Amino acid sequence: MTQRPFPLPLDLTEEDLLKVEVMYGLYSSKTGAGVEEVYLFGSGKVVLKRTASYDAVPEIIETPLDVDVLLRLLELFEDQRFFGLEDTYYAEHPGLRRIVSVVAPTQSKKVAVDNVGNAQFERAVSALLFAASLVEPRVTGRRFFALMGPM
């Protein structure tokens, strides 16, 4: 078992860490549109998933993740008060639904935003994409995802 020089975020234990999943997904309001999703797992991997349409076979990239990167991300989520955000932020004219979720044995949260979110949400998204880009550079610059990235 790993002995860390710092307490784990969200009051996690090392055993809990294996069950953590952080996800960012981008979904169009158009019927039949594809999806773009990034998953970071406490078991030590990043998964990128995209589809061109609702029923298309997903293109998936999976790569190892240093779990300390995920831990820093969770600390940032705590710092940005992500877990205190409202569950849903609606827009008058939605175009894109963006969802960030954290699933952990000790605490879980899912925030859905239509179009552009508040500062805390946008910082969480930027940090999540940066964390994923450390191990899979195609996350940035729209080299894998067509829509993900700065709005």
Image (cartoon, rainbow, N blue to C red):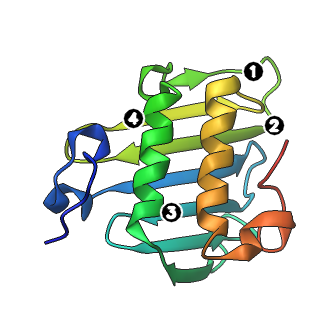
Q: For the point 79% across and 17% down, which residue is it? A: 92
Per the model, the C-alpha gap separating discs 4 and 2 is 23 Å
Numbered tag placed on residue 109 in the rendering: 4
Vertical comparison of 66 with 19: above or below: below
Q: Which mark is residue 91?
A: 1
Rounded to the nearest angstrom, the CA distance separating label 1 from label 2 is 9 Å
Asked whether, in this view, residue 65 is left or right of residue 43, the answer is right
Q: Which quadrant holds residue 57?
A: bottom right
Determine contact: label 2, label 3, CB under 8 Å. Answer: no
User: Based on the displayed image, in which of its 4 quarters is residue 70 positioned?
Assistant: bottom left
Say what amino acid the circle numbered 2 marks: Gly
Mark 4 burial class by Cα count in 10 Å: few <14, some 14-19, many 20+: some
Q: CA distance from mark 1 to mark 3?
A: 25 Å
- Which residue is labeled 3 in the image? 39
The kind of residue tagged 4 is: Lys
Q: Which mark is residue 66?
A: none
Which label's residue is closer to the chain start, 1 or 3?
3
Q: Quadrant of the C terminus?
A: top right
Q: Position of residue 40 (x, y in %)?
A: 47, 63
